[in-house]
Amino acid sequence: MLEIFERKCKLRSANNKREIHGDENVLAIYLSFEWIAPNTELERIGRGLLAALYRKGDVPVEDLPGIDAKLTALKFPTLTVLTFEDKHEHMAFTIHQGGPGHDLTLDECLVDCVSIGPKDGGTSTVRFRVRTHPKDSKTAGMLCNLLVNGDITVSVAAMESEAA
């Protein structure tokens, strides 16, 4: 399951859609993100991904934060993108805006369209999409306005009741 804790991600797109829930029209906002992740973060996406995608390199690599320097060479250099079809429901999505009391947490989000583009040297481009149903127009406007900023610090995790 995808879990991200206070990572700076690039917001690639924000799309508004109308969904029909029974007899009710509901606003849905889809936010697509991209993040350059060190290879050790792959274990937060799926157990065994680090060992499956990387092998020991022939050339020593300098120690970089979050990168397992022993596993930096691609096992499959022609693999460009690995896509997951999983849909993670009941997720909490947090936009960090400067400390406690300022963060915006949205519950009951769907996280899907997760993909990994492994790179030689121990990093991967991770992409994912978050669907949320904002409760009010102020939140909806703020979410759409995030595109102006581009880089946003976010967290994605199972909601408390789901994690237990």
Image: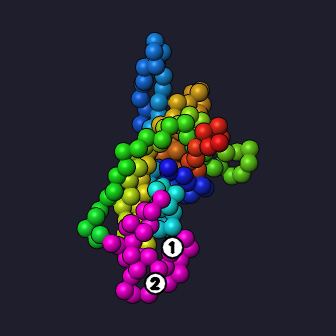
Query: At label 2, which amino acid type do we have?
Result: Val
Q: Which residue is mark 1?
A: 67
Residue lying at the far top in this picture: please name it.
23
Check the image and tell me how it is coloured. Answer: rainbow
Q: Position of residue 147 (x, y in %)?
A: 48, 46
- Vertical placement of 61 versus 16: above or below? below
Q: Are discs 2 and 1 less than 8 Å apart at CB? A: yes
Q: What whole-number distance in Å separates the C-alpha atoms at marks 2 and 1?
A: 10 Å
In the visual, does 85 lie left or right of 5? Answer: left
Q: Residue at x 56, y 57 (%)?
A: 7
Rendered residue at 74%/48% (across/down): 100
Identify the amino acid type marked 1. Ile
Q: Is residue 135 left or right of residue 30?
A: right
Residue at left offset 48%, top offset 26%: 27
- Image quadrant where one finds the C terminus: top right
- Rendered position, 32 above or below 4: above
Query: Residue 101 at x, y = what percent?
Result: 74, 44
Q: Classify residue 120 by image quadrant.
A: bottom left
Give how far across and how far down residue 80 sits, in percent.
29, 62
Residues shaded magenta = 47-75
Q: Is residue 55 magenta?
A: yes
Q: Residues within 10 Å of mark 1 (few under 14, many from 20)?
A: some
Residue at the bottom extreme, as displayed: 59
Q: Residues within 10 Å of mark 2 (few under 14, many from 20)?
A: some
**Label 2: element kind:** loop
* Main SS, magenta residues: loop
Give SS at disc 1: loop
Q: Nearer the viewer, residue 26 or 145?
A: 26
Residue 85 shows in the view: yes
What label does residue 11 carry, if any?
A: none
User: Is 101 above or below relative to 54?
Assistant: above
According to the picture, the residue beneath numbered tag 2 turns out to be 61
